[in-house]
Image (tube, rainbow, N blue to C red):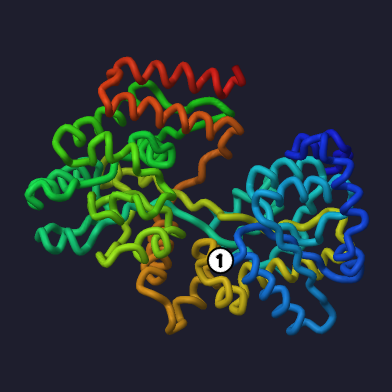
């Protein structure tokens, strides 16, 4: 952690050389930075709603801590990382830094972040935070980031449709075979008016859940970590459901992009099963339909088998290694992660609180929506059934995801066979990961 910082290292963290000089100059003249000289500066990123709530938290902390003045520096996500790289290079970064897992690795290895070990457990209480969350903010066994919120993969199902059709709700230990059976039952019992499920065959998050249940994963040490046989099994599973009507046809699937909530097959009542990342249940699904949506664990390969889900931190709070107010900054990190006021203010804006203490505060409140209660209950269930998180995705993972989607669509539209698609994907993805 004593590696010397230099301009090149921070350029590699994401700042283009062409804009470094003017940005450094602007930062050196930043009046907010001068005002914050004797204060604790806290930077964060996100949309206006998230930034507004986090600014409110900074004010709340200042009001309740007489010797500390929190200065909040909020930036839109698209601009945040370049700004942070510039501040780091100029020695002008905030004391408390909202950061993601890849950049903990980059900045931590460069010596720009302070290990939090000396503050645990006296100042920062990590006991309420699940181990599988904490380790994603560690470097060589030392804590460099405290997770603030989390997301987990789930399967959403249309309660209204299942109840109308007289079908049982999915059980926690259901299998991929059970999933297919239910999807086909939905199609048949609805008189072919509703498809059973979405088609996530081109979705890397869904493939990862399937692979982890088999003891594999998407990546290991920057390379693909699964076999041709497993990918073949994955494509064949969805091809069979596509043929039976258990999943949506190719033309509908091509229009269904995760994140385009109004066009989700679940929201449009085209299908009754779909994967949902927990922070999206309320705003992305339930608020857009008059049907009742619930969530459960993803299928396993056998009822006693491994569940593929794992908790993913939405982001972390880290400590600037050059901060002159490290003790105060560490205390704020603990208050933000574990405090009742923080939990009540943020609620589930970035997902359920990573800290069980924060989740407990919310559960004791009387103003939770049904969807928020579902997410909090599911989070505890998912944590109990989770295994160690995967390695951080390589830089080329987005491009690999695009390749998977393209091959899956070509298979669905019968442009290529599964036998042709699997080796094509494996070869193209391998080259992409190798930088070729």
User: In front: 371, or 211?
Assistant: 371
Q: Position of residue 147 (x, y in %)?
A: 61, 58
Q: Is residue 11 left or right of residue 246?
A: right
Q: Residue at x 50, y 62 (%)?
A: 351
- Residue 135 position, x and y percent, is 60, 50
Query: x, y (%) of residue 298?
Result: 33, 49
- Quarter that holds the C terminus: top right
Graded by Cα atoms within 10 Å as few (under 14), some (14 to 19) or many (20 or more), the crowding at tag 1 reads: many
| Residue 230 seen in this snapshot | no
Report the front residue among 338 and 304: 338
Residue at (38, 53) in percent of width and height:
276
Residue at image position (85%, 47%) is: 23
Residue ID at (87%, 53%): 27
User: Is 33 left, or right, of 410 in this rendering?
Assistant: right
The N terminus sits in image quarter = top right
**Residue ID for mark 1:** 355
Q: Note whether 175 is above or below 358 in the view shown.
A: above
Compared to 303, does 96 lie above or below?
A: below
């Amino acid at each position: 952690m004593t590696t010397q910082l230099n301009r090149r290292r921070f350029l590699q963290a994401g700042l283009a050389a062409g804009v470094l000089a003017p940005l450094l100059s602007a930062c050196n003249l930043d009046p907010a930075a001068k005002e914050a000289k004797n204060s604790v500066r806290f930077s964060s990123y996100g949309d206006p709603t998230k930034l507004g709530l986090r600014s409110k938290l900074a004010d709340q902390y200042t009001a309740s801590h007489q010797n500390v003045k929190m200065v909040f520096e909020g930036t839109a996500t698209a601009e945040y990382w370049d700004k942070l790289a510039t501040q780091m290079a100029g020695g002008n970064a905030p004391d408390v830094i909202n950061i993601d897992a890849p950049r903990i690795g980059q900045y931590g290895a460069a010596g720009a972040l302070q290990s939090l070990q000396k503050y645990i457990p006296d100042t920062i209480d990590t006991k309420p935070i699940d181990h599988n969350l904490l380790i994603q903010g560690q470097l060589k066994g030392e804590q460099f980031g405290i997770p603030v919120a989390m997301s987990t993969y789930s399967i959403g199902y249309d309660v209204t449709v299942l109840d109308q059709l007289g079908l049982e709700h999915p059980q926690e230990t259901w299998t991929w075979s059970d999933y297919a059976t239910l999807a086909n039952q939905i199609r048949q019992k609805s008189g072919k008016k509703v498809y059973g499920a979405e088609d996530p065959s081109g979705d890397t998050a869904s493939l990862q859940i399937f692979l982890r249940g088999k003891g594999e994963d998407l990546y290991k040490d920057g390379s693909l970590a699964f076999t041709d046989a497993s990918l073949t099994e994955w494509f064949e599973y969805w091809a069979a459901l596509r043929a039976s009507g258990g999943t949506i046809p190719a033309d509908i699937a091509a229009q269904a992009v995760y994140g385009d909530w109004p066009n989700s097959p679940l929201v449009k009542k085209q299908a009754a099963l779909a994967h949902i990342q927990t922070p999206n249940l309320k705003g992305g699904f339930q608020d857009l339909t008059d049907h009742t949506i619930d969530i459960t664990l993803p299928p396993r390969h056998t009822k006693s088998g491994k569940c593929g889900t794992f908790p993913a931190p939405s982001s972390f709070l880290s400590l600037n290694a050059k901060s002159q107010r490290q003790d105060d900054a560490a205390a704020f990190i603990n208050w933000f992660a574990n405090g009742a006021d923080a939990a009540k203010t943020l609620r589930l804006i970035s997902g359920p609180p990573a800290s069980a203490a924060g989740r407990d505060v919310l559960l004791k409140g009387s103003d939770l929506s049904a969807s928020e209660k579902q997410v909090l209950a599911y989070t505890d269930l998912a944590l109990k059934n989770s295994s160690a998180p995967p390695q951080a995705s390589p830089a080329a993972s987005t491009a690999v995801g695009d390749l998977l989607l393209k091959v899956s669509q070509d298979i669905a539209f019968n442009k290529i066979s599964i036998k042709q698609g699997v080796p094509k994907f494996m070869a193209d993805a391998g080259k992409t990961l190798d930088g070729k």
